[in-house]
Image: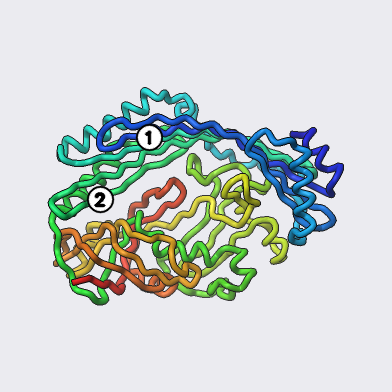
Amino acid sequence: MEKLLQEACKKVDSAEIFRVKSKTIPVNFEVNKLKSIDISENEGKALRVVNKGRIGFSSSTGNEDFNLMVEKAVATSEFGSEASFDFPGEIKRGGKEKKKVNIYDRKVANKSIEEMIKIGEDIIERMKDFNRKLRCDVTILKDYSEVEYLNSRGGSFSYNKTTIAYSVMVQKIKKQDMLMVDSSLESGKDNLKLEELTSEIIKNLEWGEKIVSIKSGKMPVIFTPKAALVLILPIISGLNGKMVLKKISPLAAQKNKKLWSDLLTIYSDGTINFALGSAPFDDEGVEMKRIPLVKKGEIKNFYYDLQTAGIAGVESTGNGLRTGLQSEPVPSISNLVMREGEVSFEEMVKDISEGIVIDQVLGLGQGNIISGAFSNNVQLGYKIEKGKIVGRVKNVMISGNAIEELKNIVALGDKSKWISGKYKFPHIYLKSLSVSAKK
């Protein structure tokens, strides 16, 4: 890496190299039977340079000659954006040692394929014990990654990271009706509990046994942690420093203003042990940290990478992340956590005379997210009647504007759940939301 960096710096003013080597093993079951075991190994490098004040970039996922990568980076710099940052220098340790972030578990790295198969079989057996007619698709996945970073100002880091995930999709087919329930658990540590996964699925299957009708109109709605992204995705987009700089975020001029319920507190935190978005540094050498984004309904910070922070005249928040080796870092959330409330899910349900619970939606992330508007078909939802869940609803759509709806939070759940390994949400109980039912 050092020799490669020296070669690059002969032709440019400054540079960084980001290298990733990974090994991923998914064990896949389809319709209750082992379907495939895949093993994929990938290695690649990304080179970002600053040449004559402009940014250039190139990447390689093969054995491409590094000199060719440098030539491509220099060529793209001729048309690249003007650089508004310097690469981070060597971390100077003061009297306070940086908090260690645990993201590697030897048990995950050493977990055998036989063990992974056994986990998948156990999940399927538990589901069949509940109902022999269920069709189960299961994936047990483990990933091991080595990450290395070096820049021309002395900034450098390296780390190893593990991921393990159990994901399940269960289908129950009865005449013309198909009930589909999805659930998953993800972590960097081998601490996932089958009981938690299967009991949630079974509870959803029990609630969904009976199909009930519901009328269109405004009514109370409870979003499960899994469905909470419907409401939170527009906030994530709106607090993105790049969107703020472009002045296309409706939240751009709202910092330190009270917008939402006092119950809403959200922060980005890349230092949570074994969360999938955690690391000691972001992908451009800035230390990960906890950043308060919303506190008691008031916007406290936007999140930035080096380039957008430089343009905005602020410091990077350590949120410069890559979606892959083929892209430069952009402002992205590491892990997003919403503070819990004090009300149980059961108490929320008891409080509602007529309303619905939303667990899964179709089309998440589609539409004009940045405006806050959403309109989603409910893939899995339940009707509440006189304080009880009475059955599953079909052909139902929810719509609204998240920026407005989050002003009307009645309560937040007292227990949170990790979603996709990097979002941690409680249940969200809204006073009123537009629900449309097809006749």
Q: Quadrant of residue 430?
A: bottom left
Residue furthest right in the image: 10
Q: Compared to 24, does 340 lie above or below?
A: below
**Quadrant in which the N terminus is drawn:** top right
Q: Compared to 194, does 431 lie above or below?
A: below
Between marks 2 and 1, how big is the CA–CA gap?
19 Å
* Residue denoted by label 2: 180
User: Is 170 left or right of 257, judged from the image as shown?
Assistant: left
* Residue denoted by label 1: 140
Residue 261 visible (yes or no): no
Residue at image coords 60%, 49%: 322
* Sooner in the amino-acid sequence: mark 2 or mark 1: 1
Q: Are marks 2 and 1 in contact (CB under 8 Å)?
A: no
User: Is 321 left or right of 119, judged from the image as shown?
Assistant: right
Residue 150: assigned label: none
x and y percentages locating residue 237 in the rendered image = 52, 64
Tell how many labels: 2
